[in-house]
Image (cartoon, grey):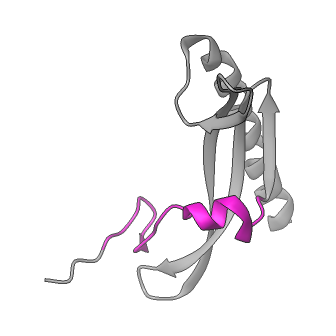
Amino acid sequence: MDKKIYDEVGRKDVQAPSASEVMGKKSPEHKFRAGSVSATIWENAGEDSEGKPTVFKTISIGRSYKDKEGNWQNSNSLRVSDLPKAILVLSKAYEHLTLKNIETEE
């Protein structure tokens, strides 16, 4: 049975960016960083519930750290002390998207 998957605004078969898209084939629209925590805005293409092409934004959040060998790593797990920074970068991402949409509509 072929089941259609819709997100909260009616787009069908929506998927988060793949690792290959995030790691090099696709550039982020914008990135906000507070210390080791960042929020990245991605522009994605898909179809709405009627099959029409649509563009939508997604936000990924992560934390950078150095491992025992001193190499930089990325994680989507946050520590309690990272939460204020996460709130800040997510607020900035939301502000960026909201203000950009208002400017585009004028």
Which residue: 50% across, 81% down?
47
Q: Position of residue 15 (x, y in %)?
A: 46, 66
Which residue: 45% across, 88% down?
51
Magenta: main secondary structure: loop
Residue 21 higher or lower than 75, as above or below:
below
Residue 71 higher or lower than 106, as above or below:
above
Which residue: 74% across, 49% down?
98
Residue 68 higher or lower than 12, as above or below:
above
Residue 23 visible in the snapshot: yes
Hey, which residue is sitting farthest top in the picture? 81
Question: Is 7 colored magenta in this rendering?
Answer: yes
Which residue: 55% across, 24% down?
78
As drawn, is 4 to the left or to the right of 11? left
Rendering quarter of residue 21:
bottom right
Residue nearest the observer in this picture, 82 or 4: 82
Q: Position of residue 56 (x, y in %)?
A: 62, 66
As drawn, is 30 to the left or to the right of 1? right
Q: Position of residue 83 (x, y in %)?
A: 60, 19
Rendering quarter of residue 11:
bottom left
Q: Quadrant of the C terminus?
A: bottom right
Residue 6 higher or lower than 102, as above or below:
below
Residue stretch rendered in magenta on the structure = 5-28
Residue nearest the observer in this picture, 7 or 63: 63
Residue nearest the observer in this picture, 7 or 62: 62
Hey, which residue is sitting farthest left in the picture? 1
Residue 94 visible in the snapshot: no
Q: Quadrant of the N terminus?
A: bottom left
Question: Is 97 colored magenta in this rendering?
Answer: no
Q: Position of residue 24 (x, y in %)?
A: 73, 65
